[in-house]
Amino acid sequence: MARKNFVRDNVPLSRFGVLVAQLESIVASAAQQSPDPLLCFDLLSDLISAIDDEPKDSIVLWQRKCEDALYSLLILGARRPVRHLASVAIARIIMKGDPISIYARVSSLQGFLADGKRIEPQRVAGAAQCLGELYRFFGRRVTSGLPETTSLALKLMKYHEEYVRKEALYMLQNALEGCGSTAVSAAYTEAFRIILRFGVVDKSFIVRIAAARCLKAFANIGGPGFGIVELDNSAAACVKALEDPVSSVRDAFAEALGALLALGMNPEAQVQPRGKGQFTPAKKLEGGLQRHMISPFIKAAGPRSRDLRIGLTLSWVSFLQAILLKYLHPDVELQDFAMQVLDMLQLDASFDAQALACVLYILRVGVTDQMTEPTQRSFLVVLGKQLQSPDSSPAMKVGALRTLSHILKTLGEVPLEFKEVLDDTVVAALSNSSQLVRVEAALTVRALAEVDPTCVGGLISFGVTTLSALRENISFERGSNLKVDLDSFHGQSTVLAALMSISPKLPLGYPAR
């Protein structure tokens, strides 16, 4: 009986059919002449475009021939750009045509990679990339093949060529994301072992990046089979990798660390895979933030300390974004995390500028920029209370003041609830014993004046009156009281200078006094 997708001689060639015929011609002549990469690239680009325009009936008619030609091109050893397009083309054809062929195609690719002989690396890379692409699109249909695909990834990790090992982990990442948490537990256990034992410590940085993306994929699908130990070990491996000499590796592991800790904070999102065996109930990763993000940040030392802190900063942002966007926590919870971030400056007696910059980045990108307007208003009061706390270090106060300025500019107004605590918070900080805190408080008052110009007159009148009183006191004071008055005198002078500097921007100007 004739096959359904058999191409009859009397059927006119469509644009898609012409491109398939050209592709078959290139593959057929490959024995005599290696396919030209540029020619293949252009042809495959046109083919993918034609798939989108072609009706389904025409795709089905040419599907088998096209799939076979693309498969042959891949296992001939096509270069990376060509094999990427060929892999995408196969997935697109199956998606738009007859999807039943996905099973045969996955099986043929697995069979090719499982061959006992050592296959030429370019051919292996092409087959692995195509298999990963098919899993990305159709993973839920071929979950039964995940254990074999995981075994193939282990086999490919033993190749000397770094691009083969990289493709093996990308294949594993696509398979994990495509299958989700629906495969058997043994597949996830083996995949996790491959990532931590081989991928994370690989000598090639591109393989380590691929390993980090696999860990992030595990977190994104709910960490099937993960318990507290696995989450803790994964996070510890990510923290260690944040001292990697290659910045792109650090960035990849920073994202993975944030995703893993966000999963650990949400046990209801952790899933258990199918299969036999005892599974412990999902539990919250208690102390995970302290162990893997706060303590390493505070204790960072040595030549890689700056890199480690930057990596942890990106991890914080990744974690906070996942908490809000993926796990849908209310944005008011960001206030509690913000206090934990500020606490990382608690022991900063030397006032490390880089540590402060990292904390400010987390507070801006991870916290305030994700808050709704009502939460930002209440957060102003929370930061004000932080300024009043006797346990706050100068660096913490500077961080709180800088964040206050950013929120005020974002809101475009001074909320009434913040005006009520202004004198006890920002104005009081003008007399702080730390010069840096006084200067930052003056800049915050300036930001407040820009947002609400009507308060400038009162602020300047208060500042001039206070300066006059302090000047009289200073002439009589001695000892510790003199130091306090001098600090206050400096703070009031600084805030007056800050207000005068923005006078051209104020529609009402400032008092003539």
Image (tube, helix red, strand yellow):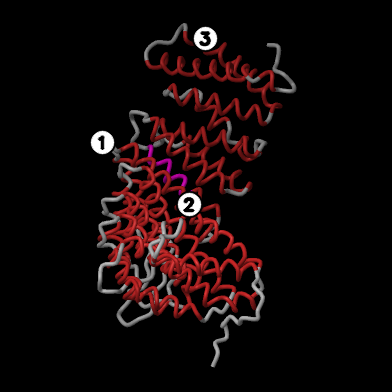
Quadrant of the frame with the C terminus: top right
Check disc 1 and report the residue beneath it: 302
Which residue of the protein is positioned furthest toward the top in this rendering? 475
- What is the crowding at mark 3: few (fewer than 14 residues within 10 Å), some, or many (at least 20)? few
Q: Earlier in the sequence, mark 2 or mark 1?
A: 1
Mark count: 3
- Label 3 vs label 1, nearer the camera: 1
The quarter of the image holding the N terminus is: bottom right
| Residue under the point 49% across and 16% down | 490
- On whether residue 340 falls in the magenta region, the answer is yes
Q: Give the range drawn in magenta.
A: 336-345
Q: Mark 3 sits on what residue?
A: 471
Which label's residue is closer to the chain start, 3 or 2? 2
Q: Earlier in the sequence, mark 3 or mark 1?
A: 1
Indicate which label's residue lies in the foreground, 2 or 1. Answer: 1
Asked if the residues shown at circle 3 and circle 1 are in contact, with their CB atoms under 8 angstroms apart, the answer is no
In the rendered image, residue 51, in percent from the top left (x then y), is placed at 61, 67
Quick check: can you spot residue 324?
yes
Residue 460 horizontal/vertical position (percent): 64, 19
Task: Identify which residue is drawn at 36% across, 40% down.
Answer: 309
**Camera-side residue: 448 or 156?**
156
Q: What amino acid is at disc 1?
A: Gly
- For label 2, the residue is 320
Quarter residue 135 falls in: bottom left
